[in-house]
Amino acid sequence: MTSQTRPSKRLETRRENERAILSAAEKVFAEAGFGGATMQLIADLAGLPKANLHYYFATKEDLYRRVVQDIFEIWLHAADSFDNAADPASGIGAYIDAKMEISRRHPNGSKVWASEVMHGAPVIQDYLEGTLRDWTEGRIAVIQGWIDAGKMAPISPRHLLYMLWATTQHYADFGHQVETLNNGKPLSDADWQMAKQQVKDIILRGIGVV
Amino acid sequence: MTSQTRPSKRLETRRENERAILSAAEKVFAEAGFGGATMQLIADLAGLPKANLHYYFATKEDLYRRVVQDIFEIWLHAADSFDNAADPASGIGAYIDAKMEISRRHPNGSKVWASEVMHGAPVIQDYLEGTLRDWTEGRIAVIQGWIDAGKMAPISPRHLLYMLWATTQHYADFGHQVETLNNGKPLSDADWQMAKQQVKDIILRGIGVV
DNA sequence: ACACAACCTGACCAAGCGGTCAAGAAAATT
DNA sequence: AATTTTCTTGACCGCTTGGTCAGGTTGTGT
């Protein structure tokens, strides 16, 4: 019985360890940057000896690359909210909601991404020139279509996208600053709700859809 | 003649060296992060032997602290554009212009600041809790005054400020990404003009002042 | 001219880094 | 039960790092 594909203890612990390492690495890379992070610190946080990290990930760069790639995937999936929307209010509104949720749930990932780009994207330059550029051009076309159809104000779609990215990611990348200005307390559920609403209010009115 | 306060060769070279070191440090810290930056790299870029750096700045952290403080000063001065404005359109418009200009002229400084905050502001936490918090509360009051006077839409001043910071600094912190999406070419004068105008267009309409 | 203080720097050091490896433990296969 | 494969780990290594320091050089006040 239960002859279903057993997880095979080997693969199971492998997955567990990889996840523990990636989770620890994301945090350490986010808090210390690539240069400031040490394999020892990641190992301690993951609860494994340092040598074991090098069994799963040959080099520090390999580990870092995986962390950045994973984030990029999550980040791109927020685009799904963008598509299948007939009008800008719902499409862009949903995109803001999705990006804000990512900032809340994956602040470390957002920081690693920001750090990578700030340092000249030495690891993911190909992603910027490939996937991201294609994605961007596609959304610009969608937004331009809305403008041409008279559904929103004639702003530059490109700069609107930058504003959306900047504003939503600010709550992750500059989360510490936001928290400090919130009297040192993390944002509550209501605070996040408020932030989301305010971003949508200003931007949607800014592009003339309310 | 010329008995005016002579610069005194000593102080002159001191100032020159300090400026060379700080300029080099800003660039290296921005490109590599605190952890990734090395005193040797900064020394080479400044054209001085490494030991000489330690004569002017005792430790790497001291040097870093000075870089961050200098940036904070520049950053705060952009607030001057905010004050002495009777209506939100000119006040916030001027603030956006000023912050965009800083992003263009001091991208490295902006990156160092961003990096510092992203890593939990280990060095400038007191600035966040003191000067920045006071500054923020003050501007929130100004904006709230405009709202109460019916001069703009009733949005949350706090989140408007976050949006302003995020959007304007995006062109510095994510300059590499912006450049890549601009076909790998740096933004031209016209591009910057366009960016400025678009940010002002969307935000000013977003807060209901156009 | 002299003496004193400020400045400069090549050589050096302890500490910590990423990464290696050999030998053993544990699981899977036969 | 034996064997092979995968996984685990303490000890170790070469290298780079931030920082030091003694001794020389340069500028300044007297």
Image (spheres, coloured by chain):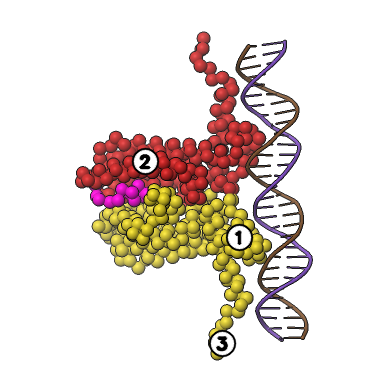
Chain colours: A red, B yellow, C brown, D purple
Instruction: Identify the subunit bearing mark 2.
Output: A
- The residue sitting at 30% across, 66% down in the picture is B86
Q: Are marks 2 and 1 in contact (CB under 8 Å)?
A: no
Q: Amino acid at mark 1?
A: Asp
Residue with the mark numbered 2: A135
Q: Quadrant for the C terminus of chain B, please.
A: bottom left
Residue A101 visible within the image? no
Q: Which is nearer the N-term, disc 3 or disc 1?
A: 3
> Which image quarter: residue D6?
top right
Front in this rendered view, residue A135 or B98: A135
Label 2 vs label 1: CA separation?
Answer: 40 Å
- The label number, if any, that marks residue B44 in the structure image: 1
Residue A173 position within the rendered picture, expressed as x and y whole percent measured from the top left: 46, 47
Q: Which residues are magenta?
A: A152-163
Cα separation between marks 3 and 1:
37 Å
Residue at mark 3 shares a chain with residue at mark 1: yes
State the image quarter where residue A130 is shown. top left
Q: Nearer the viewer, residue A8 or A208?
A: A8
In which quadrant will I find the N terminus of chain B? bottom right
User: What is the spatial separation of the Cα atoms under label 2 and label 3, in whole angstroms?
Assistant: 66 Å
Question: Disc 3 designates what residue?
Answer: B3
Residues A126 and A136: in front is A126
How far across and down, in percent of the image, does residue A96 sit?
Answer: 35, 43
Chain bearing mark 3: B
Q: Amino acid at mark 3?
A: Ser
